Image (cartoon, rainbow, N blue to C red):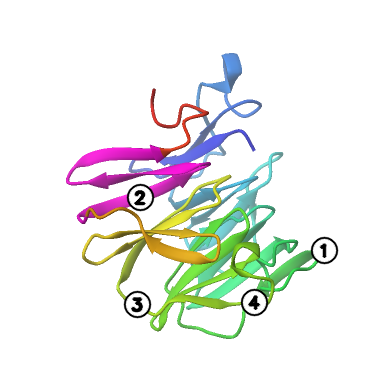
Amino acid sequence: NDGVCGIRGAEGTVWCFGPGIGAGAGGLTPVQAGSDGGWTTLDGNDGFCGIREGAMYCWWGTGPFTQVGSDSDWTAVSLPLGAFCGLRAGMVWCSGDDWAGVVTGVRHVAMLPLTQFGSDNDWSAIIAEDESVCGLRPSGLYCWGAAFGPTGLRQASTSSDWVAFGGGADSSTSYALTGDGRLFEIGFNDVVQFGTLTGWTGVGAFSGGGCGQNAGVFQCWGDNATGALGD
């Protein structure tokens, strides 16, 4: 998906732009996706999923956003490539293409329906990159998918001090923040501190790099092949 969608204003409407999605030359003029407001969460990769009034809706490039199931207690959603994972009542549920093991933790060449990942009910957050998903539980940071091995869930860190995640579409790396403002990179089968600065308050990822806020300054790093660094 070459488009970008975001939640706009206090009314919480969704607007999108990009080739085949937006208006005007190159699709660069944002257009509203549907007419509903009240969106609180939105994530994208090769599609977009979001949460509105506790219900989850997804869009895969054509037609309107379509509700996933009938539950109305979703609190988070994140999209690995070809799939999506959501969080409700402390449980992680995933659906889609399981080629990288992001739905079940074990690789399958199959499209799978909405399936609970494991049996734990104490998850508090999730974040996906192209080939893996990571989540927080009281006992630490856990990840699964192709980037963390073919055999299921892996405990990537025993720390319980994680306070925020950052990821992005087409990214092979995610980031996590600790309570004291340290920034960590979640990459292929590893979690390492990124630099020595503390005081990070937000972070996100793009293909080949990331951006974050430190001491009120917005900073970016990584591959600038697409101009993501702003020059």
Region of the chain picked out in magenta, as a range = 198-221
- Closest to the observer: 46 or 216? 216
Secondary structure beneath disc 1? loop
Vertical position of residue 45 compared to residue 32: above or below: below
Residue assigned mark 4? 152
Farthest residue in the top direction?
A: 25
- Which of marks 2 and 4 precedes in the sequence? 4
Residue assigned mark 3? 159
| Residue 55 locus on image (x, y percent) | 54, 61
Q: Residues within 10 Å of mark 1 (few under 14, many from 20)?
A: few
Disc 1 from disc 4: Cα separation:
15 Å
Residue at x-position 35% and y-position 77%: 159
- Closest to the observer: 132 or 77? 132
Residue assigned mark 1? 109
Secondary structure beneath disc 2? strand
- Which of marks 4 and 1 precedes in the sequence? 1
Asked if one can make out residue 96 in the rendered structure from this viewpoint, the answer is yes
Vertical position of residue 15 compared to residue 140: above or below: above
Secondary structure beneath disc 3? loop
